[in-house]
């Protein structure tokens, strides 16, 4: 009976290891995708801020 229990535990441990690996991979892909979206949004925000500052500077110098 103890050998059977040992084999069952090994099978369960193997299945849990595969599940954990899949979960880590999915979490990594999700984090990477989220990071790309946040990076894009921050880049757009920087572009808008720089453009506004440029317009303000040009207006102060009476170029626009």
Image (cartoon, rainbow, N blue to C red):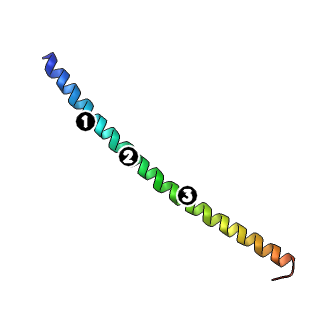
Q: Position of residue 51 (x, y in %)?
A: 71, 72
Q: CA distance from mark 2 to mark 1?
A: 15 Å
Of the image marks 2 and 3, the number of the one nearer the N terminus = 2
Closer to viewer: mark 2 or mark 3: 2
Image-quadrant location for residue 50: bottom right
Seen from this angle, which residue lies furthest bottom? 64
Residue in the image at 66% along x and 68% along y: 47
Residue in the image at 34% along x and 40% along y: 21
Q: Residues within 10 Å of mark 3 (few under 14, many from 20)?
A: few
Looking at the image, is 54 positioned above or below residue 22?
below
Secondary element at tag 3: helix
Looking at the image, is 59 positioned above or below residue 28?
below
Q: Which residue is mark 2?
A: 25
Kindly check if marks 2 and 3 are in contact, taking CB atoms under 8 A apart as contact: no
Q: Which mark is residue 23?
A: none
Of the image marks 2 and 1, the number of the one nearer the N terminus = 1
Kindly check if marks 2 and 1 are in contact, taking CB atoms under 8 A apart as contact: no
Q: Residues within 10 Å of mark 2 (few under 14, many from 20)?
A: few
For the N terminus, the image quarter is top left
For the C terminus, the image quarter is bottom right
Secondary element at tag 2: helix
Q: CA distance from mark 1 to mark 3?
A: 35 Å
Secondary element at tag 1: helix
Residue in the image at 64% along x and 64% along y: 45
Of the image marks 1 and 3, the number of the one nearer the N terminus = 1
Q: Position of residue 31 (x, y in %)?
A: 47, 50
Residue in the image at 25% along x and 33% along y: 14
Image-quadrant location for residue 3: top left
Q: Which residue is mark 1?
A: 15
Q: Which residue is mark 3?
A: 38
Q: CA distance from mark 2 to mark 3?
A: 20 Å
């Amino acid at each position: 009976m103890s050998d059977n229990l040992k084999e069952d535990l090994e099978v369960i441990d193997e299945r849990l290891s595969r599940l954990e690996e899949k979960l880590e991979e999915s979490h990594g892909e999700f984090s990477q995708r989220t990071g790309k979206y946040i990076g894009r949004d921050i880049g757009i925000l920087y572009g808008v801020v720089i453009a506004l500052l440029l317009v303000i500077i040009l207006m102060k110098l009476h170029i626009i």
